[in-house]
Image (spheres, coloured by chain):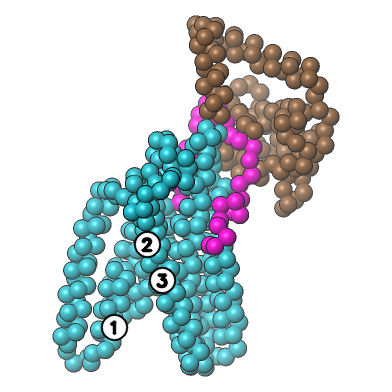
Chain colours: A cyan, B brown
Amino acid sequence: MLVAGSVLVAARSSSDDSGWSGRQVSAVVVFGGLALVVLVLLLRQLAGVDRDAPGIAAALAAEPEQRRLLTRWLLRARWARWVGGFCGVLAWLLATNARADVLLFGTAGIAFGAVAAELHHLRRARGPRTARLEVRTVRDYLMPYDARQMIRVAVVAVALAVAAAWSSHTRNATWWAIAAIVVLGLCRLAQWRVATRARPALSPSLTRADDLVRELAIGRGLARPATFLALALIARAGFAMRPSVDVLGTLIGVVAWCYAYTLWWHNRRLGLDFMIDEPRQPILS
Amino acid sequence: MILSVDPTRALPVYEQVREQIRRMVAAGTLAPGMRLPTIRQLAADLGLAKGTIERAYELLEKDAVIERHGRNGTFVSEAALLSRREVAAGLDTAAEQLVIAARQLGADEEAAVAALRKAWRQL
């Protein structure tokens, strides 16, 4: 959808306002076809059909109870991201008449969906309750790769916000960069919530599966969508700096935009589909 | 290390938490210097109000069982360990309670031992 939306924007911007060119019509046909496919997929998702989730769970864990837990999380997380992304692109179409940056709306939708997928909690049991005396922090679950990405993007956003604040012509860039910092901050908050989410005393096997769910939720589920949304915002900040530094602003914008696209592409549907194609020993065996 | 609380018991929940942590520290299963979960996390895990765990931690700190270092966390302090005889006595008491409950439920020895083994594996 993001690709199709970009094709449509490119086609619109390349033609004059007098009428629809052949390129525009073909872009609309391509986009319409893709939108139809997307609609069918959405209906399948709404019906709870995600045939890949059990396959991915089987590639992650060996024991049936672990697979059940992972499948439940995968279904919820993938569905919420998908619906979020769909709503984002729908908002882009309806609210901006497909004139704004589709990447920004799409990634914002995915990020909102990712957070929504983690906003659940266990009901309190009425009788006796058990828990392990264990300390759980974000650091226990966040992979160094994702942590480094978030820090790098945050550093770039802060640098842009400070640099853009020097000139009155680039005030908008400051706000875009601040928005990127806010997104990363909110992501950290959501990660903390996932890490400290209630967990009763489970069997060792289920505890390992729950740890894996938290690791996936904090990394692939939250850190990556926040990173590519922050990069999309940094791209906007870069483009908004053009009145002062034309070449550099454009360069920052294009690089951040391409990087955001690449990250999103590798992390689409949580980026776990490769596990079905390549038979491997389950991570939790 | 597992904590278990039952809000339906007559003993206040904060006392149940306090007593279990004190016993684990005295038995050496919670080593000195070990970090304990935050009040918020333990309250969430046990499905209790934060004030309940706060009260238990306050009393444990007063008993010098734990030390609280603000934002750095809560840690187990040095404590006099239980003797082997005291540990064995604690186990005997717990076993007696299991036997009483099993007999009240009409279960035989085999069923009680099987239930114990199952719980041991699961927790």
Residue at (48% x, 42% y) in the render: A284
Between A55 and A252, which is closer to the camera in this rendering? A55
Could you tell me residue A221's position as x and y percent? 45, 56
Residue A268's label in the rendered image is: 2
For marks 2 and 3, the one nearer the N-term is 3
Q: Is residue B1 left or right of residue B31?
A: left
Could you tell me residue A1's position as x and y percent? 29, 68
Question: Which quadrant of the figure contains the C terminus of chain B?
Answer: top right
Tell me the amino acid under the disc marked 1. Ala
Q: Is residue B15 left or right of residue A36?
A: right
Asked if labels 2 and 1 touch by Cβ distance under 8 angstroms, the answer is no
Residue at (19% x, 77% y) in the render: A28
Could you tell me residue B122's position as x and y percent? 53, 28
Residue with the mark numbered 3: A262
Name the chain under label 2.
Answer: A
Residue at (22% x, 72% y) in the render: A31
Is disc 1 placed on a helix, strand or loop? helix
Is disc 3 placed on a helix, strand or loop? helix
Residue B89's label in the rendered image is: none
The answer to whether residue A244 shows anywhere in this view is yes
Name the chain under label 1.
Answer: A
For marks 3 and 1, the one nearer the N-term is 1
Tell me the amino acid under the disc marked 3. Thr
Between B85 and A161, which is closer to the camera in this rendering? B85
**Residues indicated by labels 1 and 2 sit on the same polypeptide chain:** yes
Tell me the amino acid under the disc marked 2. Arg
Asked if residue A239 lies in the magenta stretch, the reply is no
For the record, the magenta segment spans A118-146
Residue A10's label in the rendered image is: 1
Question: Which quadrant of the figure contains the N terminus of chain B?
Answer: top right
> In front: mark 3 or mark 1?
3
